């Protein structure tokens, strides 16, 4: 959208130049192109002005400031030129459009600050201070402008000798901002940049421990800035906020890794990663939980409008150029409706400010036989896809271990014991219970498969997978409150054996997803085990529909379990793929990562193979659609499917896959596979798991026991049991 606007500005400038040179347009299409594309900019402009923002705020929607200014001036002057105004008259118009006006000085000089144009800051602020109207600015604005001027003068000569002065000015410039302010302006306040420059000077002068203190201050500022808004961010807002803060996190993590041998660096890197994960990968269930419990006509009507836009038949079409404004309008309406609901929830629900635990706080909650392993990647562009593990125990401080980044480095898809596990064992000692957070690497690093000859990790260790090790104190606290013994009565929803060829208006067989007889056997076996204690709701064949599954959204699902045995899919983004459909030969034109993964239900082949537009009952359930559901009462969802845990991985934002979508929908824990799984052995694993859980063993231990049974049954065939994990 915004790239198109830049192109429109260039075209507008060309046309404007022709007018000034008294030349005629090459064709009537020049007029049409100019007015059509510029209409999009004017629409955005009117929208922003209508909210009380300066027209220069258009630059904050990812347009370069100079380009947006040119666009507005060009549009104004073009109208005069078209009416026959002379160059002299146009010049006077330009002069009357004073740039920047005093009320625009803040945003303009802040832009110059972010782009390193300190000379422009000095010029514009000094010019403004010479005007008599300077005193009409509020005192706090005058103070900010004066501090900005000081910074601009100081920054080019910043050194260790002027470091304290730099920090003093940065501190004096502090003022509280909201996430809304940051998203509207598309940048952080300039005191962030000032602190970052101070840290860089410390690094440049080989004072890394001083730099560590400044970077730690930036961390605290980030938490303080996001604060109360954290629990209520839309995913689109999370993404925008990440793009703004990404350079800071990249810089801090690269700095800490480069100096990880120094005291305090590994704990800082660990905490920084947890902060990034909490803010940009984790989702809040408060929104869905409140909506499911509220009995409000306003909420129901608003949610209905949102759903009608989300799941409209043309949601996945690329609009023609003449529909650009309408498409933009729908996007804005959708987002504004979501914001309206969130603002409503904010009035009823107390916000949860993110609590980022220090490593020693997490260690204090551990038992003596427990260890923590957090695995993550460092910035892709800066460190060539380096994966690291940070490992600690109750009594052992965090240690950093660098891993190979690809499965091929281990040879024939087996993890070489010495490359990874020996260094970890040196840290964990005699610990036998492992809390593991490693979603990024599970497709090539399944812990259950780590072995030395015939000795597998699963024989010696209990592995507890979790989204983030920051959650350990909370998980431990809940465990103390739980009682185990007789299994509680639950609702179990079983989906499997779907008739992928079924279509009410067409009985001809089609090619596509193959029928899975094994899933019918799997569900029947599970039903036989649990039917005496649990309430079973089974959907197979033509009844295993997307609509039936969707109806679970918003229901009272307290402590319920959903088990889905079907095909999952993953498609790859390709900009030249066919537009208007979900995929073409496994490629997708859509950049939205949650459109690249999903599950298939009855009737899926008619949509998948005939390249139909997606609907709400087409048998294709994408992760994007799952994300919008409310499953906040579900205790566990089991995805009995190959590779269901995989998806697009984006640094800082995590994996966009089915597990992320169900987490967003409110599901507490998941059993999911990151590799191919065989039908027969999958059924055996699931039967063992449910049998132990139904007997009163907690679900984590029940899964570990079931997987261990499978390993004993198939000792040299980890492909039959090692791919599944239970994660919470």
Image: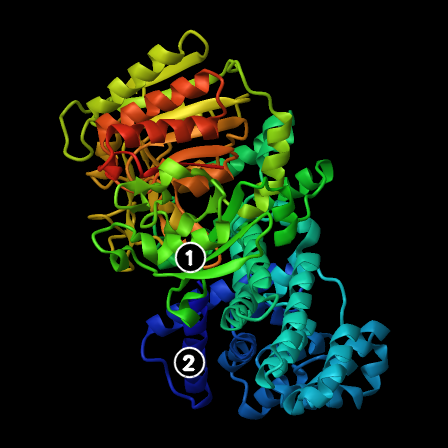
Please name the residue that numbered disc 1 is placed on. 423
Q: Is residue 112 visible?
A: no
The relative height of residue 548 versus residue 400 in the rendered view (above or below) is: above
Q: What percent of the width, then of the height, locates residue 462?
A: 44, 36
How is the model colour-coded?
A: rainbow
Disc on the earlier residue, 2 or 1: 2
Q: Is residue 556 left or right of residue 162?
A: left
Please name the residue that numbered disc 2 is placed on. 15
Tag of residue 46: none
Taking the view exactly as shown, the residue that stands out farthest to the front is 430
Q: What percent of the width, then of the height, locates residue 427?
A: 49, 54
Q: What percent of the width, then of the height, locates residue 217?
A: 69, 67
Q: Is residue 440 visible?
A: yes
Name the residue at 29% across, 48% down: 580
Q: Are marks 2 and 1 in contact (CB under 8 Å)?
A: no
Q: What percent of the width, then of the height, locates residue 412?
A: 20, 52
Report the mark closest to the observer, 2 or 1: 1
Quadrant in the picture for residue 164: bottom right
Q: Helix, strand or loop at disc 1?
A: helix
Quadrant in the picture for residue 179: bottom right
Number of marks in the rendered image = 2
């Amino acid at each position: 959208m915004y790239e198109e606007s830049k192109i429109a500005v260039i075209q507008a400038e060309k046309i404007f130049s022709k007018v000034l040179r008294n030349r005629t347009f090459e064709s009537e299409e020049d007029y049409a192109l100019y007015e059509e594309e510029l209409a999009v900019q004017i629409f955005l402009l009117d929208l922003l002005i209508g909210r009380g923002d300066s027209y220069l705020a258009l630059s904050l929607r990812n347009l370069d400031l100079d380009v947006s200014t040119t666009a507005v001036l060009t549009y104004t002057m073009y109208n005069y030129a078209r009416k026959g105004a002379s160059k002299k008259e146009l010049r006077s118009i330009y002069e009357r459009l004073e740039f920047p006006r005093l009320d625009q000085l803040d945003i303009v000089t802040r832009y110059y600050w972010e782009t390193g144009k300190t000379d422009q800051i000095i010029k514009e602020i000094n010019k403004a201070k010479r005007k008599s109207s300077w005193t009409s600015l509020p005192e706090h604005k005058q103070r900010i402008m004066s501090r900005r001027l000081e910074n601009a003068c100081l920054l080019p000569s910043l050194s260790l000798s002027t470091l304290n002065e730099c920090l003093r000015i940065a501190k004096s410039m502090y003022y509280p901002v909201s996430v809304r302010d940051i998203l509207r302006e598309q940048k952080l306040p300039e005191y962030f940049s000032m602190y970052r420059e101070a840290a860089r000077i410390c690094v440049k002068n080989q004072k890394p421990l001083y730099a560590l203190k400044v970077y730690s201050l930036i961390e605290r500022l980030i938490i303080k800035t996001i604060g109360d808004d954290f629990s209520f961010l839309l995913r689109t807002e999370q993404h925008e906020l990440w793009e703004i803060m990404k350079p800071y996190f990249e810089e801090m993590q690269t700095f800490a890794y480069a100096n990880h041998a120094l005291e305090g660096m590994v704990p800082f890197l660990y905490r920084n990663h947890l902060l990034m994960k909490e803010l940009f990968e984790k989702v809040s269930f408060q929104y869905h939980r409140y909506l499911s419990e509220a009995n409000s006509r306003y909420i129901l009507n608003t949610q209905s409008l949102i759903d009608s836009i989300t799941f409209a038949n043309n949601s996945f079409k690329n609009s023609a150029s003449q529909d650009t404004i309408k498409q933009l309008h729908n996007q804005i309406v959708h987002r504004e409706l979501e914001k309206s609901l969130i603002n409503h929830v904010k009035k009823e629900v107390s916000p949860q400010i993110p609590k980022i635990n220090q490593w020693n706080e997490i260690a204090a909650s551990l038992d003596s036989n427990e260890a923590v392993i957090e695995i993550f990647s460092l910035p892709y562009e800066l460190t060539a896809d380096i994966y690291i593990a940070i490992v600690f125990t109750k009594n052992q401080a965090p240690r950093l271990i660098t891993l190979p980044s690809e499965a091929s480095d281990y040879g024939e898809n087996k993890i070489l014991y010495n490359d990874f596990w020996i260094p970890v064992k040196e840290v964990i000692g005699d610990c036998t219970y492992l809390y593991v957070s490693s979603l990024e690497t599970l497709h090539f690093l399944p812990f259950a498969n780590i072995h030395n000859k015939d000795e597998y990790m699963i024989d010696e260790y209990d592995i507890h997978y979790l989204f983030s090790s920051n959650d350990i104190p909370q998980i431990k606290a809940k465990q103390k409150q739980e009682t185990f013994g007789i299994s509680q009565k639950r609702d179990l929803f079983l989906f499997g054996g779907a008739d992928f060829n079924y279509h009410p208006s067409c009985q001809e067989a089609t090619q596509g997803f193959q029928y899975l007889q094994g899933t019918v056997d799997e569900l029947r076996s599970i039903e036989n085990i649990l039917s005496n204690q649990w309430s079973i709701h089974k959907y197979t064949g033509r009844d295993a529909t997307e609509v039936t599954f969707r109806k679970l959204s918003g229901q009272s699902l307290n402590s319920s379990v959903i088990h889905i045995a079907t095909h999952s899919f993953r498609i790859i983004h390709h900009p030249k793929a066919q537009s208007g459909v979900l995929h073409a030969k496994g490629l997708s034109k859509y950049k939205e990562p949650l459109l690249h993964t999903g599950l298939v239900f009855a009737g899926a082949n008619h949509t998948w193979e005939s390249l139909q537009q997606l609907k709400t009952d087409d048998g294709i359930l994408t992760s994007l659609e799952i994300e919008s559901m409310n499953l906040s009462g579900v205790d566990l969802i089991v995805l009995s499917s190959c590779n269901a845990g995989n998806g697009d991985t984006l640094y800082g934002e995590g994996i966009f896959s089915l597990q992320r979508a169900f987490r967003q929908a409110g599901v507490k824990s998941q059993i999911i596979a990151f590799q191919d799984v065989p039908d027969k052995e999958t059924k055996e694993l699931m039967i063992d798991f449910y049998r132990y859980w139904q007997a009163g063993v907690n679900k984590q231990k029940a899964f570990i026991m079931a997987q261990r049974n499978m390993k004993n049954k198939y000792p040299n065939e980890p492909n039959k049991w090692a791919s599944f994990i239970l994660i919470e």
